Image (cartoon, coloured by chain):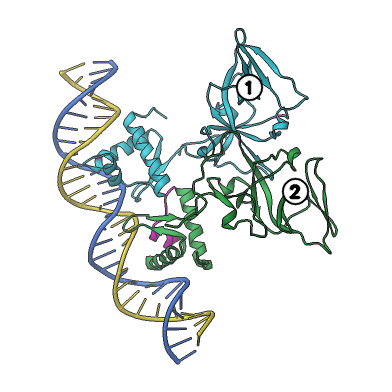
Chain colours: A green, B cyan, C blue, D yellow
Amino acid sequence: MHELTPRQAEILAFIREHLATEGRPPTRPELARAFALGSTNGVQKHLLALAAKGAIELIPNAARGIRLLGEMGLPLVGRVAAGSPVLAIENVLGRYPVDPSLFKPRADYLLQVRGLSMRDEGILDGDWLVVHRTTEARSGQLVVARLGNDVTVKRLRLRGSKAELIPANPDFQTLHLDLTRDVLEIEGIGVGVIRNLMAAPAPVAGRRVHRL
Amino acid sequence: MHELTPRQAEILAFIREHLATEGRPPTRPELARAFALGSTNGVQKHLLALAAKGAIELIPNAARGIRLLGEMGLPLVGRVAAGSPVLAIENVLGRYPVDPSLFKPRADYLLQVRGLSMRDEGILDGDWLVVHRTTEARSGQLVVARLGNDVTVKRLRLRGSKAELIPANPDFQTLHLDLTRDVLEIEGIGVGVIRNLMAAPAPVAGRRVHRL
DNA sequence: TGGGATGGTGATAATGTTTTCACCATGCAC
DNA sequence: GTGCATGGTGAAAACATTATCACCATCCCA
C-alpha cells in the first residue's frame, strides 16, 4: 500500500470513527459535511484515491458502499527471525480480532511469548503479549527489546546512563547495559496479556493477507 | 426486551451476519431478497417490530439506517453479590469490546479475578478471566463454581463421585467435595485470560446500559 | 515550464433506498 | 366471532446516494 497523504489519513480515520459510533459507513454527503467541503465530488476523489491505495474498497452503486480493508485484527508475531523487523511478514502467524482500544496505549500487535522468563508476573510460555509499538519506554515498564538479533520481553529499569532488563523468574539473569556504550533498541511496550486456556483460535486471516 | 419470534430472530441474525461480512447493514431490498420476499414492506414491518422490541434502532431516512443494539461487547463481572446470579446487573462493572469468537468455546462474559489462588497458573489479582457459560465441566478444566453464596475460580478434578477444586498456589487449600452429598454448581469454564498491564480501559458502556 | 498528483467547486442524471399507501391471510386469546 | 399480533403482496412517491461531467488552483518534480 502506498503511503496515505495527511488529508487521506484524516478521511480514513473519520470513516473508521463513523463506523464505530454509527454502525455503518458514511455517505459522501456526510463526509463532505464533516470536512466542510461544498461538493461531494471532492470526497469522491479522496475515496477513489484511498481505494487505489488499497485502504478501502468501494462497492459500486451501493449506498454507503465503503469497506475498510486491512482492518482484520492485530497480527500475531511468532518467533522473530534473526535481524528481521518484528512485523516482517515471515514472523506473522496470523491476524486475530483483538480491539486495539481495549488497551492503553493503543495495541499494535501481539507477540507470542516464548519461555518462562516473566513467569512470576503471570506471563507464561505461549501467552500473547499485547504490544504498543514505540521506541521510547520509561523505567518500570515491560518492554519488547531487541538485543542484537534477538527480541526479548523484560521489565526495564533506567538509572542514569545504566539500564537493566529484569526477568521475573529467579532462574534467569538480569541484563545490565551501559547506555553510553551499548545500544538498547526498544520495539514496543507491553500493555496487556491474552491467554487462550483451550485450543488456540483460528486466525481471521492466515499468514498472507491479500488485498482482494 | 420482549422475546423475538423465530422469524424476527432469523432476520436479526441475518443483519448481524451481513454487518460482519459486508461491513455495512443491509437495505430493505437486500433483506427481501435474502428471505425471498416479494415486497420490501414485509421487511419493513419486521424491522419495525425489531425496533419496537429494542433489538435494533432504525435511523429515519438514512440508507442502511439499521443499528444493532445490545451488541457492545462482553460484560465484565466484578465481585459477585451473595446469592445473586453472576450476570445480575449489580455485578456488572461495564462492557468491553472483546470478540467472543477469539476464544473456544465462545466467550460469554469476563470475570474479574480476586486474590492469588491461581497465581501459579499465571492468573493474578485483577485479571479478567474469560468465561464460557455452561453448567457442565470436565475434569481438568478451569471452572467458575458457586459454593454456597460465593463464586470461586479453581481447577476441577473429578474422580468418580468425588470432586476436587484445586487452587494453583500452595498457600490455598484444595476443596474436597462428595457429589453424593454436596452440590457443585458450575457457572462456566475459563477459556482465556486478559490482563491490562497499564491502566484499565474505559468500558464501551457503563454499569447501566440503556437502550436509547 | 510543463505535466501529474492532490484537493477542490458546482451541477446533474441515474440509481438506490426508505416510507407509506391499500389490501390479504393466519393463528390465538377473550 | 371479533380483535390483535404476525407475516405477507404490490405499488408508488419522496428522498438519499452514487457517479460523472466540466472546470479551477496548488504543489512538486523532471
Residue drawn where x is 23% and y is 40% of the image: B37
Q: Nearer the viewer, residue C17 or B169?
A: B169
Circle 2/circle 1 CB separation < 8 Å: no
Residue A203 spot, x, y in % from top left: 51, 45
Cα–Cα gap, marks 2 and 1: 33 Å
Residue drawn where x is 71% and y is 27% of the image: B168
Segment tinted magenta in the rendering: A23-33
Is A31 magenta? The answer is: yes
Label 1 Cα neighbours within 10 Å, binned few <14 / some 14-19 / many ≥20: many
Position of A206 relative to B206 (above/below)? below
Q: Are marks 2 and 1 on the same chain?
A: no
Q: Secondary structure at mark 1?
A: strand
Name the residue that disc number 1 marks.
B156
What is the three-letter code of the residue carrying label 1?
Leu
Is B92 magenta? The answer is: no
- Marked residue chain, label 2: A
Quarter of the figure with residue B175: top right
Quarter of the figure with residue B83: top right
Would residue B200 be found to the left or right of residue A46 on screen?
right
Residue drawn where x is 78% and y is 52% of the image: A139
Q: Secondary structure at mark 2?
A: strand
- Marked residue chain, label 1: B
Residue A106 spot, x, y in % from top left: 61, 51
Position of B18 relative to A51 (above/below)? above
Q: Name the mark on residue A154.
A: 2
Residue D27 spot, x, y in % from top left: 53, 79
